[in-house]
């Protein structure tokens, strides 16, 4: 019986990556938002967030007040608008920017003073 030598597993590696890319993400995710308002509408907290707490920056705020608050929310991954998120991430140069489809589906976890 002759044995064959396999030098490359490129096909299998590419196949694994394709499966991960096509899987539909489900479940709950935590998002972060900066605001200069101390009063927040808990039923409609806003549509622009960061997916990574370390990426939160006040540089992207239109109205910077003297005090900033970090809003932490949870929402289902299906509520994230991927196209709008990519567009905003590119325009602001921050890959962590996330846009939600319906901000009323975000449940507020906490509001705390922001410290940079």
Image (tube, grey):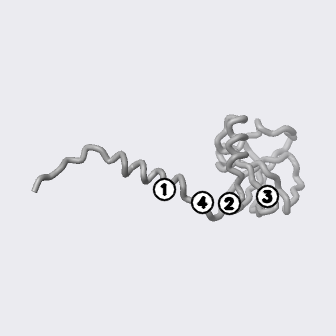
Q: Which of marks 2 and 4 is nearer the N terminus?
A: 4
Task: Identify the residue at horizontal 71%, vertical 40% (top origin).
Answer: 87
Q: Is mark 2 on a helix, strand or loop?
A: helix
Residue found at the far front of this picture:
1
Tell whether 28 sits left or right of 44. Answer: left
| Mark seen at residue 102 | 3
Secondary element under disc 1, as helix, strand or loop, is helix
Q: Position of residue 72 (x, y in %)?
A: 74, 56
For numbered disc 3, what is the local secondary structure?
loop
Which dot marks residue 78?
2
In depth, the one of 101 and 40 nearer the eye is 101
Residue 19: image tag:
1
* 43 with respect to 48 (left or right): right
| Callout 4 secondary element | loop
Asked if the residue at tag 4 contacts the one at tag 2, i.e. Cβ–Cβ closer than 8 Å, the answer is yes
User: Residues at badges 4 and 1 in contact (C-beta under 8 Å)?
Assistant: no
Disc 2 to disc 4, how far (Cα)? 7 Å
Q: Nearer the viewer, residue 68 or 40?
A: 40
Picture quadrant of residue 40: bottom right
How many numbered marks have been drawn onto this rendered protein structure?
Answer: 4
Task: Identify the residue at image location x=68%, y=35%.
Answer: 93
Circles 2 and 1: CB distance less than 8 Å? no
Disc 4 vs disc 1: which is toward the camera?
1
* Closer to the eye: label 1 or 3: 1
């Amino acid at each position: 019986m002759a044995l064959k030598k396999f030098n490359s597993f490129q096909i299998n590696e590419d196949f694994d990556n394709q499966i991960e890319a096509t899987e539909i993400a489900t479940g709950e995710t935590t998002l972060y938002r900066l605001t200069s308002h101390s009063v927040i509408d808990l039923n409609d907290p806003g549509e622009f967030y960061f997916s990574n707490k370390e990426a939160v920056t006040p540089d992207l705020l239109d109205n910077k007040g003297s005090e900033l608050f970090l809003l932490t929310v949870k929402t289902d991954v299906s509520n994230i608008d991927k196209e709008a998120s990519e567009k905003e991430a590119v325009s602001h140069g921050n890959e962590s920017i996330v846009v939600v489809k319906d901000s009323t589906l975000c449940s507020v976890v906490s509001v705390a003073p922001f410290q940079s």
